[in-house]
Image (cartoon, rainbow, N blue to C red):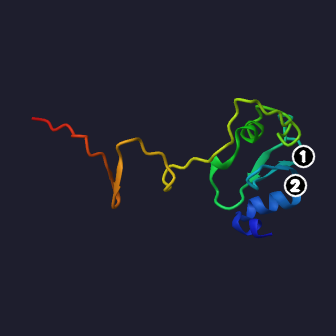
Amino acid sequence: MAAFLKMNIITCLLTKFRGQFVGEDAYGNKYYQDKRVRDNGKHRRWVIYKGEVEASKVPPKWHAWLHYVIDTPPSTNTIAYQWEKPHRRNLTGTKFAYKPRGWAQTGVINVMPDYESWKPE
């Protein structure tokens, strides 16, 4: 019920009364679809995030299901290829963000010691 408290009231009501649970990913995000079929013949689909609401936390196969690229939920279709890597959310803005070689953290500003900016004459 704690997840419902973080949602807005419309999403909470929609999920409670018209939502049909479809599956859950490895990160605890829960996926739903509307019990009713819309005019275009499709069910409305949505995700309830576990913790922080961050779109990059949705794994690629679930993203494909949410956007009607595939029809069956990934929980029922779990083909894994050898070249697939585990999904990671976008780490930009966190302490785990990628920084190229040569960058050093000094206080708040990142500086590159061997870089000299261009100055117009």
Q: Which mark is residue 18?
A: 2
Q: Which mark is residue 65?
A: none
Near-viewer residue (93 or 40): 93
Instruction: Decide if residue 25 is on the left or right side of residue 18.
Output: left
Near-viewer residue (94 or 30): 94
Task: Name which residue type carries label 2.
Answer: Arg
Near-viewer residue (69 or 35): 69
For the C terminus, the image quarter is top left
Query: In which quarter of the view is residue 109 placed?
Result: bottom left
| Residue drawn 22% across the image and 40% down it | 117
Q: CA distance from mark 1 to mark 2?
A: 7 Å
Task: Name which residue type carries label 1.
Answer: Arg
Picture coordinates of residue 103 (x, y %)?
Answer: 35, 46
Picture coordinates of residue 60 (x, y %)?
Answer: 70, 38
If you read the primary sequence from the N terminus, does the residue marked by circle 1 or circle 2 appear first?
A: 2
Q: How many marks?
A: 2
Helix, strand or loop status at disc 2: helix
Q: Which residue is mark 1?
A: 36
Instruction: Decide if residue 74 is on the left or right side of residue 86.
Output: right
Q: Is residue 7 above or below residue 87?
A: below
Look at the numbered discs 1 and 2 and tell me whether their residues touch, using CB distance below 8 Å: yes
Picture coordinates of residue 105 (x, y %)?
Answer: 36, 55
Picture coordinates of residue 115 (x, y %)?
Answer: 25, 40
Q: Residues within 10 Å of mark 1 (few under 14, many from 20)?
A: few
